[in-house]
Amino acid sequence: MKRATRTRSGAPGIVDVANQAGVSPATVSRFFNSPDVVRADTRKRIQSAATELGYIRDRMAGAMHNRFSGTIGLVVPTINNTIFSELIDAFSNQLLHHDRTMLVASHNYDLTLEASIIRSLLERRIDGVAVIGQDHLNSAIDMLTVRSVPVVALWGPASNTSIPFVGADNELAGFKVTDHLIKQGHRDIAFIFPDVTNNDRANARQKGAMRAMQKANLTVAPNRVHACPYDIAESKKTASRILEKNKPTAIVCANDVIAHGVIFAAQAMSVNLPQQLSVVGIGDFTGSADIVPSLTTVRLPAKRIGRLGADALVKMNEYGSEYTFANQLIETELIIRESSSHPARHG
């Protein structure tokens, strides 16, 4: 094996890699910027030399010339629970296939903070930004638009937005789980949803649930709609209050996190599931198939959305106006498990 050598002290540079691989510095530069123009055997020697030397590409220096930093931003409402964990993981892993890295930040459903985060990302010459949903301050999106930085909205579509999206139909998801309960024979259904302000996904799911009720000519009493954040402890408290008296035959939850809390509350109060209460969620998050009883829910394809979103941003960044992005609406699937049943079984 050829011994690794350096032309100067300190961290290895492009000249060191060139000497180690037996090529010119210009060839090494072409390899890192446009690898397809370099012959396969030469690419292999350069990559081997870079690995042996521990060479780290200075992307920010390259950004001075071609505006690419190699980093994509992902701004999510929260990283405090499992809601977006699968999305973040898939997004990050897919970027690695493109030799890109990810910066992730959360705004805790504060759109003013989201705008500040986007400003900070732009200061780092970010190559593109993925945001969640369609509710954003105009100033935040304008900062990206005027600088021609690609932006993609993940998780939820909208018909009246200029932001391209990769997502699932959240309104249809809310409709599916509610319609499932209605078809099972439920009429007294309660609903637990978070504050829909600055949360177009929850708003859409709630609209879909109400649409299913209206389609079935069912009235939803005010005391059957309850507010609760995406938090198991809080949803457990909310469900306990609902179940203390005049309990419904079923509860529709805005997502699986809330549904898990409802199941825990029912079990603590010795309410048999699903014999005395059916519970449904939205998302099909990790653990929903393994909880007892296993949760009936709508599967939102978080991993696929993450992968496709990463692919789209890389293409938008590399090809600019030459690449026409087509909005992608991913199908959802109703997953019927043990937590829902016909109300005739309830006692």
Image (cartoon, helix red, strand yellow):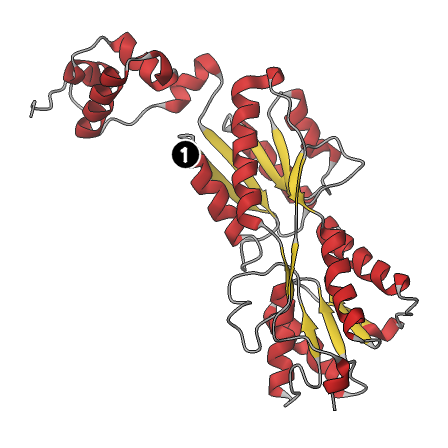
Residue 192 x %, y %: 74, 68
**Camera-nearest residue between 179 and 68:** 179
Q: Is residue 7 visible?
A: no
Residue 64 x %, y %: 45, 15
Q: Quadrant of the C terminus?
A: bottom right
| Residue 6, image quadrant | top left
Q: Quadrant of the N terminus?
A: top left
Q: Is residue 334 above or below residue 327?
A: below
Tell whether 168 sits left or right of 12.
right
Would you name the residue on which mark 1 appears? 97
Tell whether 126 sits left or right of 233.
left
| Residue 52, image quadrant | top left
At label 1, counting other C-alpha atoms closer than 10 Å, the crowd grade (few under 14, some 14-19, many 20 or more) is few
> Element at badge 1?
helix
**Residue shown at 76%/40% (left/top)?**
158
Tell whether 113 sits left or right of 176.
left
